Image: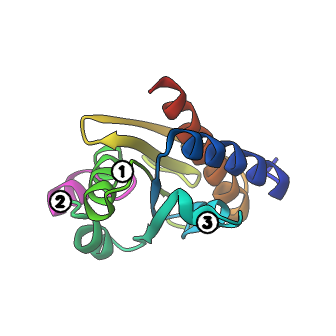
């Protein structure tokens, strides 16, 4: 079952409250979610207090140019990989000076999947520095919209959990 608008709003509000209480800021570095995480975070009035911005780096060239992702990482591991999302976090933090970053890169479908990375494979990373970054892969089911919705919800909840541990 895909994440509903209400679930996305609740997760976004929860993360927004955490960020504001800590005086922290966030930046998004998104590929398969196409800016949806930033959209959900900025749906709330006053979000400029905690959202620095969002970078939609759908192409490998944009990942390299805007976030400093190494060509070797893309060549050796592919865009949908742990090294790439970790570098996306590092680049987003360096580019914006935000306190925390979230990065997402995946195969939303319906095409583009492979045996190694089938449709629904999504890598996530969140962190406050290159040394303090967590990455995890998820395998979602459903159509393109469902995979993307699930990815947005997982990303919001993942950052929230990361911040609770900090």
Q: Is residue 120 depicted above or below 51 in this figure? A: above
Please, is residue 89 above or below residue 69 in the view?
Answer: above
Sequence order check, earlier mark of 3 and 2 = 3
* Residue 12 falls within the magenta-colored stretch: no
Evaluate whether residue 86 shows in this view: yes
Secondary element under disc 1, as helix, strand or loop, is: helix
Residue at far top of view: 165
91 left or right, relative to 155: left
The reply to whether dot 1 and dot 3 touch (C-beta < 8 Å) is: no
- The residue indicated by pointer 3 is 36
- Local packing at callout 3 (Cα closer than 10 Å; few below 14, some 14-19, many 20+) is many
Name above or below for residue 48 compared with residue 87: below
Residue depicted at x 46% and y 59%: 28
The one of 43 and 102 positioned closer to us in this rendering: 43
**In terms of depth relative to the viewer, which is nearer, 95 or 48?**
48
Secondary structure mostly seen in magenta is: helix
First in sequence: mark 2 vs mark 1: 2
- Residue at 59% from the left image edge and 51% from the top image edge: 120
Q: Quadrant of residue 4?
A: bottom right
Q: CA distance from mark 3 to mark 2?
A: 25 Å
Start and end of the magenta stretch? 70-80
The kind of secondary structure element at disc 3 is: helix
Within-10-Å neighbours for mark 2: few <14, some 14–19, many 20+: some
User: Going from the N terminus, do you reach mark 1 or mark 3 first?
Assistant: 3
Label 2: which secondary element: loop
Residue 118 on image: x %, y %: 52, 51
Residue behind mark 2: 70
Horizontal relation, residue 132 to residue 20: left or right: left
Label 1, on which residue? 85
- Comparing labels 1 and 3, the label whose residue is closer to the camera: 3
């Amino acid at each position: 079952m895909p994440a509903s608008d209400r679930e996305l709003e609740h997760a976004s509000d929860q993360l927004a409250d955490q960020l504001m209480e800590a005086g922290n800021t966030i930046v998004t570095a998104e590929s398969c979610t196409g800016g949806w995480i930033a959209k959900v975070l900025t749906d709330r009035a006053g979000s400029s207090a905690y959202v620095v911005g969002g970078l939609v780096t759908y192409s490998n060239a944009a990942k390299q140019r805007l976030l400093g992702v190494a060509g070797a990482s893309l060549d050796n591991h592919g865009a949908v990989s742990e090294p790439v999302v970790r570098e996306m976090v590092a680049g987003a933090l360096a580019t914006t000076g935000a306190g925390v970053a979230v990065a997402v890169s995946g195969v939303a479908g319906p095409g583009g999947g492979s045996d190694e990375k089938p449709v629904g494979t999504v890598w996530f990373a969140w962190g406050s520095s290159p040394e303090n970054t967590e990455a995890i892969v998820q395998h979602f089911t459903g159509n393109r919209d469902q995979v993307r919705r699930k990815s947005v919800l997982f990303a919001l909840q993942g950052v929230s959990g990361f911040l609770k541990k900090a």
